[in-house]
Image (cartoon, grey):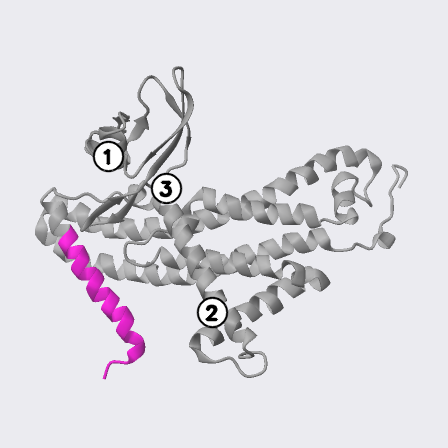
Amino acid sequence: MIRKSFFLPAFCLVLLTMTATVSARAAASGDEELDPIHHSVDGNYMDFSPIGKLELPRIFVTSSADEGLGIDFFLTSTAAVERGGYAATWDTAQGEGRYYEAHLTPPGGGHVLVDMSITRHLVFAWIGMLIVWLLFTHIAKMYKAGIGRETAPRGLLQNMLETLILVIRDDIARPSIGAKSDRYLPYLLTAFFFILTCNLLGLVPFGATATSNLMVTAVLATFTFVLTQVGGTKDYWMHILWPPGVPTFVKPILIPVEILGIFTKPFALAIRLFANMTAGHLVILSLIGLIFSFANLFGDGAGYGVAPVSVAFSLFIYLLELLVSFIQAYVFTMLSALFIGMAVEEHDHGHHVELSPTH
């Protein structure tokens, strides 16, 4: 008898193999191409291939000599071109006719100042926010009713979430921040569960990973940056603007380095999360792309032949991505707590000895 624990991976493998072989046939006939970079970046549409694509609303803040500043709203990119008079230009000839993949220019010699259009990464960020809000609204009601406070947690969902909450509180927040940890715990929990939810949404069919968008990770890192600087104590700022325990003539060299460090920490946070979540998807798409490449080069038989091997490796990377989704959420939260903890910590300067050149 097949163990239940192996059923889901086996089912995924069969499903992915069937999908891949169909894709290989399409690639061999020249009807379909797979571009890993293109499929992992953001776009003004929801990709439900091979079913189709759903265009998303376009919102432009424009400027023109005749009308000045204005805001244009269209339900789709096609509507912007066909009814709004926008001009479409494509980077490649293959994009002709697909207005949602084009650069749009307003009519009358105007230009777009700000493109506020809704993208699929933004949609999945909203979905992630909604899921986190619904989960914790439900859990809060259970705690308010005494379930989990006066009694043991009830149900798989509450037990699972409480386990993660305790890990963030007891293994990250309190060791890193100390007595002030409860003040920053809501942010750390929100960041962890939002990042984790967005990471996992990118692994579902037709999903997109909002955390593989640098703008999303930059906003998250900015929140950590602001909380760190606002919560910084006098000791924290003194270590940056006038480092104790070093010779005076060294301080003009060290101070710019310390100031630069203020900005490199959130920058590293944003890049680390963005790069890790993008890399895994590119590897999976590249492995699936082997089917297309072999089918185009050597025919249908080669596409069918390489499909099981390609999909098996893709499934392994997929399961690894599942682990990475948790690890990256944990790492971002842990580093945020460390940065905040270093800023709010009260330092003891009694052990510092001001060195003079004669020493």
Mark number for residue 100? none
Vertical side of 105 occupied by 8: above or below: below
For the residues labelled 1 and 3, the Cα–Cα distance comes to 14 Å
Label 2 sits on what residue type?
His
Q: Are marks 1 and 3 in contact (CB under 8 Å)?
A: no
Q: Residue 57 lies in magenta, yes or no?
A: no
Q: Specify few, some or many for label 1: CA neighbours under 10 Å numbering under 14, 14-19, or 20 or more.
A: many
Q: Which mark is residue 118?
A: 3
Q: Distance of mark 1 from mark 2, alpha carbons?
A: 40 Å
Image x and y of residue 72, in percent: 36, 31
The amino acid on which the numbered mark 3 sits, given as a three-letter code, is: Ile
Local secondary structure at mark 3: loop
Asked whether the viewer can see residue 308, the reply is: no
Pointer 1 or 3: first along the chain? 1
Q: Is residue 185 visible?
A: yes
State the image coordinates of residue 104 (x, y, percent, origin top left): 31, 28
Report the side of 243 relative to 77 (left or right). Answer: right
Up the image or down, 98 lies above or below 162; here it is: above
Mark 1 or mark 2, earlier in chain? 1
Tell me residue 181's x, y (percent): 67, 62
- Residue range in magenta is 1-23
Count all numbered tags in the image, as a single digit: 3
144 lies left or right of 209: right
Label 2, residues with CA under 10 Å away: few <14, some 14-19, many ≥20: some
Q: Amino acid at mark 1?
A: Thr
The residue pinned by badge 1 equals 78
Tell me the residue that label 2 is attached to.
Answer: 138
Give the distance between the C-alpha atoms of the residues marked 3 and 2, in whole angstroms. Answer: 29 Å
